[in-house]
Amino acid sequence: FDSFDAPTANRAPSIIPESKENLSGNEPDQMTPDECVDVKKDSIILDASIPPIWLEWRRNILTSAVSRRLLREMARIIDPFLGDVIEAPMKLFRRHIHPLVPYGASHVLQEACDGEAILSLIVEYLEQLCTSFDVSKASVVEQALIIVACPNQPQRIVFAVLLHCLTARADLAEDIMRQAAHDQMQRCEAFIVPNDDLVQGRKTKHNVSSQYIRRQASIVSFQLELCLWLHRGGAFPMSGLALKETTIGVRVGLVVAAWGRCHECLENIIKCEPDCAMDFERGRQLWSSMKMILSFYPKEEIDKKGGETTSGGWEFLVDCNREEATDLLRHRKYGSFLLRPHPDDHGVFTLSFKTNLVIENQKKDVAKDENTNITSKIPEKKDKPAKRDDVVQHAVVRLSDAGFKCGSFGPFSSLLKLLEAVSTSLPFDLLFSEPPAQGIIKEEGGQSSPNSVFIRKLALHSKTDHYRWNSSTRESNVDDDTNLEGNSEECYQEEHNHTTENQIQILKRLGMFSQLLVLTEIRKQISAVVTADDDEAIDLMSHWDENKNTDAKDSVVESSYFDEDLAGSFDDIGEEEMDAIASRTIRPFLSWCRAFEVSVVPDILPLLSDVTERPINTSLAVTGSDVSTMQQGRNKFDYGDSIIRQMIQPRSGVEFRTLRVGEAGHSAVIVLFRKSEAIAWIVSSGREKNEANAIKRLDVMEKRRVIEQVDLNLFAPDKYVVGLHGQDEQQLDGSDKEIRFRFVDPWEVEVIESKEAELRSASIGRQHYVPFTIGAVSRACEDSQRRLGGLHLLSLWSAVKGGVSLTKAVASVFPPWERNAGGDLNVVNGVVLQPSIYSNSFRQHLYRNSLFRRLNLPQRYLALIQVELLDLKNLTSPGGSPSLTAYALLRLKRDASNAPLTQKARTLDSASTEPRKISKSSGPNAPASWGSVVRFRFPLPEGVDSVGVSFDKHREALFKGAPSVLQLSVYEKKFMSDIALGGADVKFDGLSTNGQVEEWVPLRSANDEITWFARIRLMLRFELMCMDSGVASSKDCMDSAGLKRIRLLSRIGGAQEEAKGVQKSTSTPDIVSTFQRVVSSNT
């Protein structure tokens, strides 16, 4: 059987020799009698029949040869669309620049597939072979399937599918694709517990061992996509379930192949959604394990509410002009409508709808017959006669950043909401349940295959030097020929020898989070595909070109060629069972996602020890051991709080004076010390060896905003400065003359003038804050993403909106103590320790700040407290509260502070309301008549735990905790001298971000009497801002909130330095108590 020529007709095979020449080679005349007897005996054997086993061998050999000939012909036919691709060697595939799909995939999937023509060619050739060699079609196909060995050769899936189609067994072809898609899903389990990440890259054992899985997954994905391409071309039918499984199998396989290797492939998967039915709402319920929420409305109400719409109203989009739309709607029921796109502006549409107007000279019974099944909102007698074209009205719909808008309706967040609002305003209902059948713009099924756009983009990029360009943009580039079997740890240390361990951990966390975002976005797509309805939107036999010749004479494949039942006939299956099938289909991929979520948690969330650390000593007084500790650690870097704590002690030699700025009701007091005295003390105490080092130490403290320079010559002219030019100041040099320093509280409070200024840039406390912007977050993550995966990973990070997603994730995280709610109570000495609602709100946002800090992100929360003064009443007055003009002084302070709040004892963080006339009112429910609003904001400082306790014991001793009390003093405005009505301290224990607190507060007068009551309303919010990390020093940054306040008050009334009640020579216990009182009041 060296040739495939058919045997001669009517000729049986024979083994009888044609001549008398035999084994002896003698002539017949020369044969002896004995030889003639032997010939006669041999002739008896020649008349016997051929053994059946020989015939079976012949049939098997012939069938095998025909099968191989058929496979060679099939290979020739499918070679133009890359159906038989050679498997790349592993040495080449493991290079990250090697493409995951063939180079020519973009050209193949760009054009439609003529599946019937391809299948007809193969069928014709098979019939010719079977006729010529007298073999059965089934045996040839069966032998070809054995040769292909599809389960063991994934690159032969297209062969196996077409072979089953030759015998009209589309169900078996479907099983081949479903099994391959199932194997793609099972490959996800190999990535559930990996030991590699984007930092370690390809230098791990898991990455090396997974290369074979990745190569097989990429081959199977392209083979399955070719099968979908053939299906779209009409080669064979597919059930809805098989179509879903195959579509998601293609994407999951390429996700496995590209994981940690090709970021652009993952980006294209996210950007290019599959061209098939998708239901994101049901998909969300699937991947979030939420209970299915079914509609309880009757079908009639669903029709009115637009519940029958499957695409949010876009199924009414029709590509036509005004005249065509009028013709389409003129003879339809009133309420029928469609949307027309603008030919030039993609953000403008036209809503065309049929009205209930009656055309002139038209019989009423005709109009009645047309609208028999429609229930109008108004009687028919109100129908007005109109012209022929007026029965169809048109309205312009515009899409902007605010949403959809149509005339005075909107903006709305979705098109469906706008259409519902328009329907409500009309005298009839728009028919949401009857989309137009002519000219509708169908987005599903418009491509040559469900994943053609995505694979074409991937193939186009792989044909260029795009991948090499990506590798060159990485900050740490590794040669592709690196020996992966070497010591991974040594390669890792060699590559990152310039990077600290902290930076490596930050890169690892951000890389894992970016991978988690990718899995999340792909999970949404896959869940939306697998939960979509199997309705007429997906044809079992899909045809790309509807105008091609379908004559039965020219087509070998008839319409009834495939008569077997396909999988996925689920007419009798309920919705819950369909959801169970969908869940089982993608369960390995969901397990991968959930396992990755669990692995990310310990890397991103801080340890409990990082948020529960406590300082050893919190007393303001300095003990002998503290002094020795300070002196021993003078060469170590510290922020300077220990210097301040020792500087304010008695007999330190540093003189503290108060500076009063402003006049009358607009004044404040600041505690200052001189630079020259601080330098002398630092040198004399042994903190630094000489003045130069002492000056550098002060500069470091100033950059860290532990102290802040106050140059009085810049805030007020000399003629307005009183008591500044003492004899001792003549010893200062030029630039240091009149320079003072003030202490900066980490919890510094700023008074906000208006609501617009709540998110204004400022230096508050010891940090510089700017408004939260997406650009600031992107810049913070840009360097990390580029170092991890080059520009492709950076582009992928932008595609999934990584900065916004990371911010939302951290902003919504629950602290560990809230996640463990329901456990044992914290009992100490028989008392249950339960933090207040106010403290718990701070603990929650301090914990979130620690997460941002752990990820090296600039986002930080700031606290905003709004105080509304609603009313003022004198409950002891029998005739009700008289009319008066009143104002209030307000300040946020710590609970331990007892400093008074008066016109003469105000600090920079205190606020004064404008005098308001409060009218006379009576009754418990009298309307509010005051109406003054004061806003405060203060930062949540760095270097504190989740409770607000500083890690630095010296700072905690000086500035202990956040403000927790509102100090209120109310005055009656008089012509000569204002009268104090009383004051109160309002604690914030019941204040939280979930609501507001409104109460009547008794005002206690100087003689401890309560006559007046103030009605106030408190609100607490936390706003997200960004730290300005680009500020090099306090001299180059924006003015702080304190300096702005000092400048404003000095312009009003100048500045005056006083030493009243303070000894000028040395520090005394009086100055310590004064400083403690000022510090406790958030100086």
Image (tube, rainbow, N blue to C red):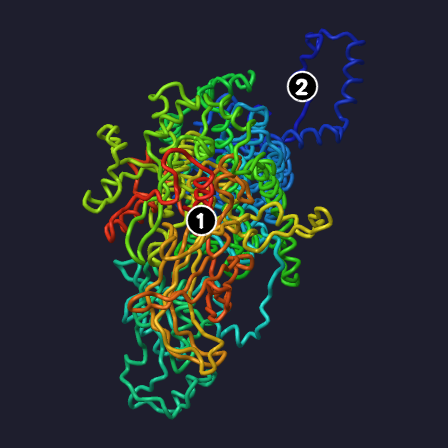
Nearer to the camera, 182 or 865: 865
Nearer to the camera, 145 or 826: 826
Q: Is residue 267 left or right of residue 353?
A: right
Q: Check if mark 1's residue and mark 2's residue have beta carbons within 8 Å.
A: no
In this view, the residue farthest toward the bottom is 381
Give coordinates of residue 214: x percent, y percent.
Answer: 55, 31
Nearer to the camera, 1063 or 224: 1063
Whether residue 554 can be seen here? no
The residue beneath circle 1 is 1081
Q: Which mark is residue 978?
A: none
Three-letter amino acid code at the position of disc 1 = Ser
The residue beneath circle 2 is 17
Residue at image point 25% right, 44% down? 722
Residue 184: image quadrant is: top right
Give coordinates of residue 834: x percent, y percent.
Answer: 64, 52
Q: Earlier in the sequence, mark 1 or mark 2?
A: 2
Residue at image point 67% right, 32% down? 59
Give coordinates of residue 1028: x percent, y percent.
Answer: 36, 40
